[in-house]
Every structure is written in C-alpha cells, then in structure tokens.
Amino acid sequence: MFEVIQISAFKDNYIWLLRMGGAATVVDPGDARPVLDVLDGKGWSLDTILITHHHADHQGGVADLLSRFPATVLGPASESIHGIGVPLRGGETVSVAALDTRFQVIAVPGHTLGHVAYYGAGCLFCGDTLFGAGCGRLFEGTAAQMADSLARLAALPDDTAVYCAHEYTEANLRFALAVEPGNAAVRQRAEQVSERRAKGLATIPSTIAIEKMSNPFLRCREPEVVATVRRREPAAKDEEAVFAALRGWKDSF
C-alpha cells in the first residue's frame, strides 16, 4: 500500500503525494514548488500526475514538474490541461505501476463538465466534487449533474478514505448545522473539526460513511433537510430540486 502525504498549497488547497519506495504520484499539483520541496528533500522521483479538472489551482504546477521529471499525466480528455498523456472520460481503470495500484476513473461532472475522480486501494481522490461536509460550486455543470456525481461517490464502500482538494470542512459544517440542526453526527463532527482547526490540523481525509452521516448534500432525502429547504423554497418538491435549492443557499451562506 502506498503512503499518502498531504502538501498544503495556496490558501487552503491540498496536493496529495502518493509514495511507494522512491517513486511518487501527485494529485492536482496546482503549485510545483511545495511538491518539489518534498521530492527533493526525500530524494524521491515523480512518476505520475493525476489531474481531476482544469482549474489553475489543480494543474498550474504541471509544466514545472514536467521540466524536472518525465512523469505521465492523466486527466480529463475534454478539458484544457497541460501535458496530458492519458486522456480520461470516466469508466476507465488505469494502472499506476509505481504504486502497484489500479484506479477506477469516475466521471463526476458538476463543478466542471469534465471533472473526474480516482478511486483505488480504498482511497478516493475527488478534487472539488465532494468536500468535507460539502460539495463544489456549479461553475459549469447543473445541479442534476452534481447530484448524480455525488450519488456515484456515495455508493463507494463506507470505509473509503475521502481525499478532497480543499480545507473547507469547518465552514461547511456551519452550513450543515443550519440545514440539519437536529443531526447529532453533524454537531459531533463540528466539535471535533473545530478542535482540530484550532490546533492547525487538517480535517481531511474523512470517509464515505462520515460524509453520508453529516454532509447535507448527500442527505437530500432526509426529512429534516427537506423540511428546512422547503421552508426557504416551497417549490422544492423533489430530491433534485432540494439539492439545487441547497446548493444555491450555500452559495450565499
């Protein structure tokens, strides 16, 4: 099994470095410098780059990394991303030999239209689709697309470790408490996350089980969530409309 190393970048991004022996894979390197600092400090080489979507804070460091290492770049076929050697659309299974691991590529449109996630060895690298207690904004896709993408991820095994790309959990839980104040799992998670953030610690990874218990965007059938949303949006009659109203509310929360 590979080791997962968290690398902080920008204000709240996480770049994930996966390492087995002296070979590394990185997920969404928006900035090359912190990645190179780790690689150079440990004497590791970069074998593979996995990209979830085209936003600059997820792929901005690719060119500089490729100037140092002959790495293979995998990413969405339909998005403009530097250096892609293996274009993906979802549904593929890709082998990363340096990690002795095969990843399922899952199409998760919503945040962007070509967004993909990688699932393998019990780990999910989901970019900006599923966050700790939240989900990504709808910059390109529709609410229906995002709801379907989240359902696809929620169907993964409960013990799947969720490695998203931003430290948004504390703010997302404040919203979750407004949506579902009667949910004890949300309250407990909010307390735990607050303690971790006060110590400067990360709240990621979580698990699919944790997200299903406390992430309002995965709970659009729950009676309290539905009731809260309908008090704001009486026209939200079905699950898709509840999700759309919830996402719109979060945008201005």
Image (spheres, rainbow, N blue to C red):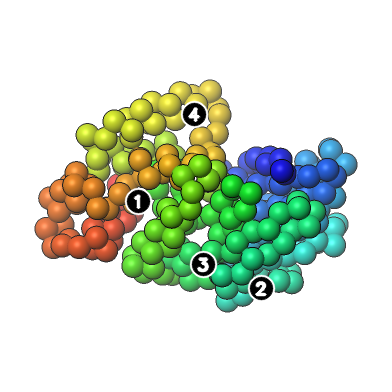
The image quadrant of residue 175 is: top left
The quarter of the displayed image where residue 224 is located: top left
Q: Residues within 10 Å of mark 3 (few under 14, many from 20)?
A: many
Q: CA distance from mark 3 to mark 2?
A: 12 Å
Q: Which residue is mark 2?
A: 87
Amino acid under label 1? Leu
Q: Is residue 209 above or below residue 230?
A: above
User: Disc 4 and disc 2: Cα gap in Å?
Assistant: 37 Å
Residue with the mark numbered 4 = 197
Residue type, mark 3 in image: Ala
Question: Which residue position holds label 3?
Answer: 107
Residue 226 placed where, x, y %?
A: 19, 51
Residue 191 percent coordinates (x, y): 38, 26
User: For the residues marked 4 and 1, what is the alpha-carbon distance in whole angstroms?
Assistant: 24 Å
- Do callouts 3 and 2 mark residues in contact (Cβ within 8 Å)? no
Q: Nearer the viewer, mark 4 or mark 1?
A: 1
What residue do we see at 76% from left, 53% from top? Answer: 100
Asked whether residue 201 is in view, the answer is yes
Q: Residues within 10 Å of mark 2 (few under 14, many from 20)?
A: some
Viewport quadrant of the N terminus: top right
Marks 3 and 4: in contact by CB < 8 Å?
Answer: no
* Residue placed under numbered mark 1 in the picture: 218
Residue 16 spot, x, y in % from top left: 65, 47
